[in-house]
Amino acid sequence: MIRAARPHEISLLPQIENVADERYVRFGLRCVLEMPPHGIASLDEGRQRDMLWVATSPRNRVVGFALMTLPGGTAWLDQLSVSPRWQERGLGAALIDRTARRARELGHDRLYLSTYLGVPWNAPFYERRGFASVPRGQWPLAFRLQFAIENSHGHPPWRRTIMQRRV
Ligand SMILES: CC(C)(COP(=O)(O)OP(=O)(O)OC[C@H]1O[C@@H](n2cnc3c(N)ncnc32)[C@H](O)[C@@H]1OP(=O)(O)O)[C@@H](O)C(=O)NCCC(=O)NCCS
């Protein structure tokens, strides 16, 4: 089930982000695992703005989350994470749909994100859900800034892309 995050659940999310990222290691991307997860303050800001959702198990345990932000006024899927045990059951796709719905409610016509090329659960996964890469020459200033911030955390920029889909 996908629903809005509750205040007492925020502290669970950085750990979910960390364990979800373990799957990058076998793709030569240990750097992702070594980056600090989202902090409590930015997650709670997302919750207060109704831009943070959790995926829950049948016992109502939080097993994943999605955070949307608005860099430069665009709807941006900032983080999507599902705990390893709960991956590949459709929760990631459902969190994307919930995020897209909120973007539409806020008056946006597109949802954007940055991700890894050639990692099966990144760009190919988003492509199968209607996302397409935005050519680098078309990136507005806000995206170039966003990309620079992410790269400063350690992402190798040549392996990354920015994607968009209509909402
Ligand atoms: C991305 C992520 C949230 C997806 O969550 P999920 O609940 O597993 O998502 P779904 O069950 O909806 O779909 C999983 C997809 O990944 C694909 N996938 C996962 N692992 C794969 C692998 N090793 N090889 C091939 N495909 C793989 C599945 O085929 C499936 O795509 P499909 O339904 O189009 O076939 C999860 O993999 C995760 O937390 N990853 C680490 C963090 C991350 O990469 N976040 C996104 C950053 S942009």
Image (cartoon, rainbow, N blue to C red):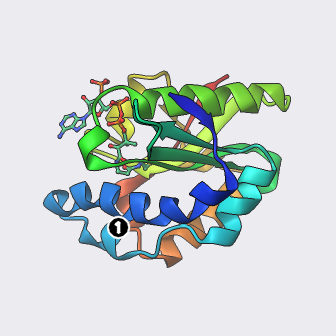
| Residue projecting furthest to the right | 107
Q: How far across and down, in percent of the image, does residue 165 sit?
A: 59, 27
Amino acid type of the residue that numbered disc 1 sits on in the rendered structure: Val
Give the x, y percent position of residue 153.
48, 76
In the picture as drawn, the residue positioned furthest to the left comes out as 26
- Residue identifier under label 1: 32
Image coords of residue 167 (percent x, y)? 67, 22
49, above or below 167, in the image: below
Q: Can residue 131 be seen in this view?
A: no
CB at disc 1 and ligand 1 closer than 8 Å:
yes
Residue at point 37%, 65% (across, down): 18
Q: In this view, does 1 lie to the left or right of 18?
A: right
Q: Which of 78 and 137 is in front in this view?
A: 78
Horizontally, is 107 left or right of 36 in the view?
Answer: right
Q: Residue at x 50, y 27 (%)?
A: 1
Residue at 80 percent across and 53 percent down: it is 48
